[in-house]
């Protein structure tokens, strides 16, 4: 039988806390955690969130915790959230509840009047880790998901993560500790409860050591995740310094490492497949809210990906002027088109993969990305390039190339001069 008091005492000594904020719902795990922490030589406070979802039962949980805090002479912080009201705007109950919960815990922990080494203690145990592991496995969430919950993450500690539910319950019964049961834990409308009450009990019948095996696996995935984090962090530093990532370096990363790269860059994972397929110079991907200080767009340059700082190109403002005749001298700084040969509306847009132009003086066509590459533009200049198109063709790459597809001639009845404003 594990000595829970010693286990948690030894665990906390590794982190040398000056103050403990115990997140307590009134359930078995967090209530036992609270009782044990009270026995240890640390200032303890309670944090409780009442989501008001279960009516009298939710109120009973709050009253239970408040009474317990009074009996144990422990300061208590309570946050009441009208979650039913918030669910009218968003159906993701678990996400909203988690946001309120952790935001509230951090608010208490980071109180400027409190000691700096304050930690929030959470009552997750070994079976909770098993549930998280299988839920993330079903979601195909990669190494980060399979790593599950960490015993120590930032200022959050989970001292019971290596302890089973049975061991926690045995301690509660042996020490006459009462707790509250949450009836919503039986509801199968929540995905976690399906795993907890239906799927995993059957798996445990077939695999008696399931929870211990998962615990061991998550520790290994956490080790792997940490190695990837360190490796990719070093890569991020190089990107921030040189603003480029060699294609060979990117391709040498395995799938999990590429996912971690996206995570640290702030690139949505859904863009990774598009990134992998970039093959035309000048094309790239853009994203919002980068995690690092180097911009929100990468451009494929052939041998490397260039990271560009700043926003994507804004729509080009251009001027259309009707003219009666063509000039004696032409350049690529403006274009003269035959209105009768233009298909649909004229507009400027950024280049897209596969764009082709039919240059004057040539047969056939060229990739716009090759035209831009040959011009030896900087990555920033490449990012800013926009092209004139109609509904069928690329007509003009300003200053670089003019298409023959709608170009005016001396026989044209209606000539329009187009120049960038």
Image (tube, rainbow, N blue to C red):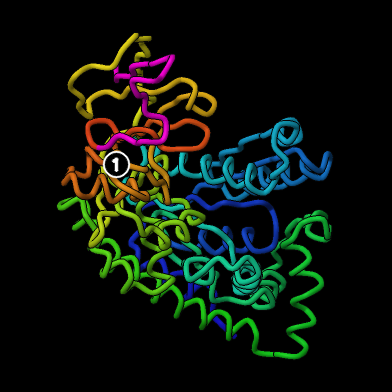
Q: Is residue 122 above or below residue 250?
A: above
Q: Quadrant of residue 131?
A: bottom right
Q: In the rendered view, would you say 322 is above or below 179?
A: above
Q: For the C terminus, which image quadrant?
A: top left
Front residue (pair 187, 343): 343
Label the magenta part by its dominant secondary structure.
Answer: loop
Tell me if residue 200 comes above or below residue 310 in the rendering: below
Segment tinted magenta in the rendering: 401-421
47 or 208: nearer the viewer: 208
Front residue of this view, candidates 268 and 342: 342
Residue carrying label 1: 295
Q: State whether residue 10 appears in this view.
A: no
Residue 352 painted magenta: no
Q: Is residue 410 part of the magenta span, yes or no?
A: yes
Q: Position of residue 12 (x, y in %)?
A: 40, 66
Q: Position of residue 417 (x, y in %)?
A: 33, 17
Quadrant the N terminus occupies: bottom right
Percent position of residue 396, x then y: 34, 33
Disc 1 element: loop
Residue 325 at what x, y percent from top left? 31, 12
Is residue 355 in sight in this rendering? Answer: yes
Left or right: 252 in relation to 11: left
Identify the residue shown where x is 50% and y is 62%.
39
Q: Residue at x 73, y 84 (%)?
A: 204
Query: Splitting the image into 4 quarters, where does residue 320 fall?
Result: top left
């Amino acid at each position: 039988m594990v000595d829970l008091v010693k286990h948690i005492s030894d665990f906390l000594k590794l982190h040398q806390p000056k103050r403990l904020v115990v997140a307590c719902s009134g359930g078995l795990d967090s209530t036992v955690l609270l009782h044990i922490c009270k026995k240890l030589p640390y200032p303890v406070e309670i944090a409780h969130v009442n989501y008001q979802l279960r009516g009298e039962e939710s109120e009973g949980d709050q009253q239970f915790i408040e009474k317990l805090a009074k009996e144990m002479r422990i300061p208590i912080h309570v946050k009441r959230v009208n979650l039913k009201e918030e669910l009218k705007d968003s159906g993701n109950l678990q996400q909203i509840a988690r946001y309120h919960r952790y935001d509230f815990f951090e608010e208490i922990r980071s109180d400027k009047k409190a000691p700096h080494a304050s930690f929030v203690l959470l009552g997750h145990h070994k079976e909770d880790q098993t549930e998280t592991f299988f839920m993330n496995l079903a979601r195909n969430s990669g190494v980060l998901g399979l790593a599950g919950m960490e015993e120590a993450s930032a200022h959050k500690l989970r001292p019971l993560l290596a302890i089973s539910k049975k061991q926690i319950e045995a301690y509660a019964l042996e020490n006459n500790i009462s707790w509250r049961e949450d009836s919503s834990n039986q509801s199968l409308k929540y995905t976690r409860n399906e795993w907890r009450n239906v799927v995993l009990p059957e798996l445990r019948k077939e695999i008696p050591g399931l929870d211990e095996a998962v615990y061991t696996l998550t520790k290994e995935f956490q080790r792997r995740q940490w190695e990837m984090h360190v490796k990719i962090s070093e890569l991020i530093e190089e990107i921030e310094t040189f603003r480029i990532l060699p294609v060979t370096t990117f391709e040498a990363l395995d799938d999990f490492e590429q996912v971690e790269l996206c995570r640290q860059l702030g690139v949505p994972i859904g863009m990774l497949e598009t990134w992998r397929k970039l093959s035309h110079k000048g094309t790239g991907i853009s994203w919002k809210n980068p995690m690092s200080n180097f911009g929100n767009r990468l451009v494929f340059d052939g041998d490397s990906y260039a990271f560009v700082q700043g926003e994507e190109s804004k729509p080009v403002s251009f001027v259309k002027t009707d003219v009666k005749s063509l000039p004696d001298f032409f350049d690529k700084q403006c274009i003269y088109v035959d209105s009768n040969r233009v298909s649909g509306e004229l507009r400027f847009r950024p280049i897209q993969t596969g764009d082709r132009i039919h240059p004057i003086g040539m047969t056939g066509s060229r990739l716009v990305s090759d035209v831009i590459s040959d011009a030896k533009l900087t990555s920033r200049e490449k990012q800013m390039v926009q092209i004139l198109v109609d509904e069928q063709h690329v007509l003009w790459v300003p200053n670089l190339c003019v298409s023959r597809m709608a170009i005016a001639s001396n026989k044209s009845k209606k000539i329009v001069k187009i120049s960038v404003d």
